Image (spheres, grey):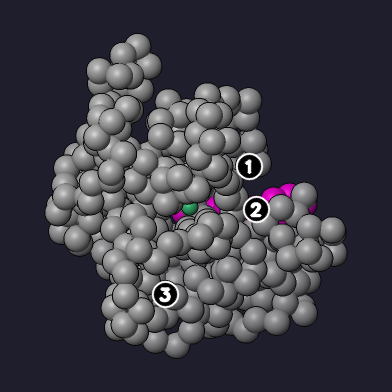
Amino acid sequence: MRALVCDGPERVALREVATPEPGPGEVLVRVTVALTCATDFKLLRRGHPKFPFPLTLGHEFAGAVESAGEGAGFQAGDRVTSSVSGPCGVCTECRAGRENLCDTAFERPLFGAFADFLLVPRRIVKNGLRRIPQGLADEAAALLDPLASVVHGLGRVKTAVDGGVLIVGTGPIAAMLFFLLRGKEEERERDKIGGVRRVVVAGRRETRFGFFLERGASVACIAPSSRETEAGAAALPLFTFKENPPLPERADDRRGEGARNPRSRSFPLVIDTTGDPGVISALPALAADGGTVLLFAGLPSGAGVSLDAHAVHYREVSIVGSFHYTPREADEALALLSRGAVPAAEMVSAHRPLADWRAAFDLARSGTAMKVGLVP
Ligand SMILES: [Zn+2]
Ligand SMILES: [Zn+2]
């Protein structure tokens, strides 16, 4: 079978490798589609603390069971998708329902979907592998992993009924956050609960703004270099909001720091999907009093961020982290996908044969497509 194997940073090739045989409790999946993800690009660039080389890339996928080991509980032909991790189910974190923090959940992460076949290890078969519900397309089901992370992130914070949300970053995670937050707004309108949540998406790549503007979000530009703003923060705000329609002015916007950036302190919830310390530093100033800054994106180990401790104390701005997801959140993601809460066709807007993986990566990295589906 073919597999896109990465031996080290920027050393990757589509190779012929032996097709694995599933042992007891394991499942061999014939991949029908695997999606590009920034995690794979990051791995390719600099490796990942949880996933050592050599490694076959690809972890968002759907397929059909080719063969199953004894006691796996799956049959040949079952359509499946999966979580990436295999929580142990017995440690303190697992028993407390925080399987995302299980120490051993990533001992054998499920990478290797950019290939003809993928062997699912026993623990992931038990806690991560899922049959795709009838009526849900493979490609939509392949969004389980990123969407489950988004579900977990939103579960970590309060989403105010009538407050604004600032999503920082314009990639696929930002898009999924947008779809879920917007969806909730529609539910409220339908149920006449009242209150309108404004969603603003901020980024550096104006090529991606169109995606969000077409779908009713407002956008904000982030200045090209965060270092630039450190030198002259007062003169040059990091964020420039392009209103669509304008944000409501706050009374205190007319004085003090608000006068320099009239849109500051507007958002009960600010979500970072960039992992850029320079950008993160600027976020407490944009959070409303009592608001929350959610650090969704991962930062490299040892990364430090300078934060406005004054805002954390006097304005009670909370800084909250979010990592991965639990098996329950994976179920919820699959249910959301079945309900069409995240339109898969808008998320996966291009397809390429597995052999053209380089073109697919370029397409996704250029921002032309949110995600590209690689088809073996
Ligand atoms: Zn991913
Ligand atoms: Zn555990």
- Residue bearing the label numbered 1: 51
- Residue bearing the label numbered 3: 337
Label 3 residue SS: helix
Separation (CA) of disc 2 from disc 3: 23 Å
Residue at x 84%, y 58% (from the top left corner): 92
The region drawn magenta spans: 104-115
Taking 330 as reference, is 241 above or below it? Answer: above
Mark 1 and mark 2 residues within 8 Å of each other at the beta carbon = yes
Q: Is mark 1 within 8 Å of ligand 1?
A: no
Taking 337 as reference, is 311 above or below it? Answer: above
Separation (CA) of disc 3 from disc 1: 27 Å
Q: Nearer the viewer, residue 324 or 105?
A: 324
- Give the image location of residue 207, x and y in percent: 18, 42
- Residue bearing the label numbered 2: 109
Residues packed near mark 2 inside 10 Å, few (<14), some (14 to 19) or many (20 plus):
some
Q: Nearer the viewer, residue 221 or 128?
A: 221
Q: Is residue 225 left or right of residue 2?
A: left
Residue furthest to the top: 231
